[in-house]
Image (cartoon, helix red, strand yellow):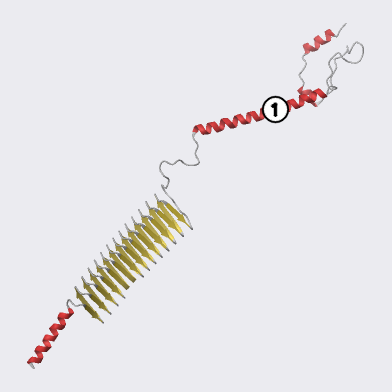
């Protein structure tokens, strides 16, 4: 009996040692704690993996610190300095991790390579990629932040993409939003499909539907709604519609000279044409004193018949008429 008890105790001790610092720790229901283990898998309950290679939780809470991979089917997953953090339902938090993926719930990745969230909220700080299917995603200093629906915030990230909800990217390379609001500060590209996009000091901002406001941007394209572009003019470039003062003066002077010349030429042409008609119309104008009869017309001066050309003839003064009457006298 004593030998049997010793063997049973020895087996129990070996079993406990295998559970700690083991290659794999699996719990069907309840709580599983794996320290420095290669893999930690929990079907239901809470799982905590520290410096582990992989942490997988089907339902409950999973916490992975400095782990290679953290996967959570339902519940909350927290990965610190891990390579990958995946959560199906619940919340996932990855700090300095390579990848953080959340199906539904909240995902937080700090200094991680990739953060992906299907539903809930995802926050990636200094991460390479942050992807959110539904919920909110926040990426700070990350390479890429993608959100399908919900809110995405990327600060100093390379790329921020949001399908639905709100995306905010600060100092990021690219920010894309399918639906909702996208805010990009000092980013290279911002592309929202629907919603509002705000890009500050970015290289390119493209908005499919919604309103986009870029500041100091290189390119801004919008399919629908209103775009407001501020301070996009290149320094040193002159506006296309403005003229210099001397150019305005020159144009005005040429216009005035052309108008005066046109009216003067028209006036002289009309006057010359009317004076030529006087040459052929000799019967209208008769000199005084040359009336019918041998001595001429000594009576009242001849009154010429009215004609349209009479206005253009040179008027005869009364002195000239007097002198002509004296010369024609006896």
Say which residue appears at 41% left-offset and 54% top-offset: 204
Question: Left of 258 or right of it: where is 284?
Answer: right
Rendered location of residue 326, percent (x, y): 83, 8
Rendered location of residue 174, percent (x, y): 37, 58
Rendered location of residue 67, percent (x, y): 23, 70
> Height in image: 259 above or below 205?
above
Residue extending farthest bottom: 1
Rendered location of residue 68, percent (x, y): 25, 70
| Front residue of this view, candidates 113 and 153 | 113
- Residue where numbered disc 1 is placed: 267
Say which residue appears at 49% left-offset and 33% top-offset: 245
Q: Residues within 10 Å of mark 1 (few under 14, many from 20)?
A: few
Quadrant location of the C terminus in the rendered image: top right
> Height in image: 144 above or below 277?
below
Residue extending farthest left: 2
> Height in image: 75 above or below 142?
below
> Height in image: 238 above or below 190?
above
Question: Left of 98 or right of it: where is 318?
Answer: right
Question: Left of 280 or right of it: where is 124?
Answer: left
Quadrant location of the N terminus in the rendered image: bottom left
Q: How many marks?
A: 1
The secondary element bearing badge 1 is classed as: helix
Say which residue appears at 35% left-offset and 63% top-offset: 145
Residue extending farthest right: 293
């Amino acid at each position: 009996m004593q030998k049997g008890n010793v063997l049973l105790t020895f087996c129990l001790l070996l079993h406990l040692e295998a559970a700690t610092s083991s290659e794999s720790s699996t719990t069907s229901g309840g709580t599983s704690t794996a320290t420095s283990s290669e893999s930690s898998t929990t079907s239901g309950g809470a799982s905590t993996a520290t410096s582990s290679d992989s942490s997988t939780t089907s339902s409950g809470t999973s916490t992975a610190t400095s782990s290679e991979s953290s996967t959570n089917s339902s519940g909350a997953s927290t990965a610190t300095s891990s390579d990958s953090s995946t959560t199906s339902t619940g919340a996932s938090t990855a700090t300095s991790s390579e990848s953080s993926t959340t199906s539904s719930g909240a995902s937080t990745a700090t200094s991680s390579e990739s953060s992906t969230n299907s539903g809930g909220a995802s926050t990636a700080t200094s991460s390479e990629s942050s992807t959110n299917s539904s919920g909110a995603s926040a990426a700070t200093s990350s390479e890429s932040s993608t959100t399908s629906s919900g809110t995405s915030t990327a600060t100093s990230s390379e790329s921020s993409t949001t399908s639905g909800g709100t995306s905010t990217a600060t100092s990021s390379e690219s920010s894309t939003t399918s639906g909702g609001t996208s805010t990009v500060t000092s980013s290279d590209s911002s592309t929202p499909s629907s919603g509002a996009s705000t890009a500050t000091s970015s290289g390119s901002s493209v908005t499919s539907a919604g309103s986009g406001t870029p500041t100091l941007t290189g390119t801004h394209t919008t399919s629908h709604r209103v775009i407001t572009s501020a301070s996009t003019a290149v320094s040193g470039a002159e506006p296309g519609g403005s003229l210099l003062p001397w150019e305005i003066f020159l144009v005005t002077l040429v216009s005035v000279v052309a108008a005066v010349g046109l009216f003067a030429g028209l006036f002289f042409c009309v006057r010359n044409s009317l004076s030529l008609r006087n040459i052929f119309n000799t019967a209208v104008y008769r000199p005084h004193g040359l009336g019918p009869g041998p001595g001429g017309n000594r009576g009242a001066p001849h009154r010429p018949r009215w004609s349209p050309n009479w206005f253009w003839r040179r008027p005869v003064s009364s002195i000239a008429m007097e002198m002509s009457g004296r010369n024609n006298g006896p």
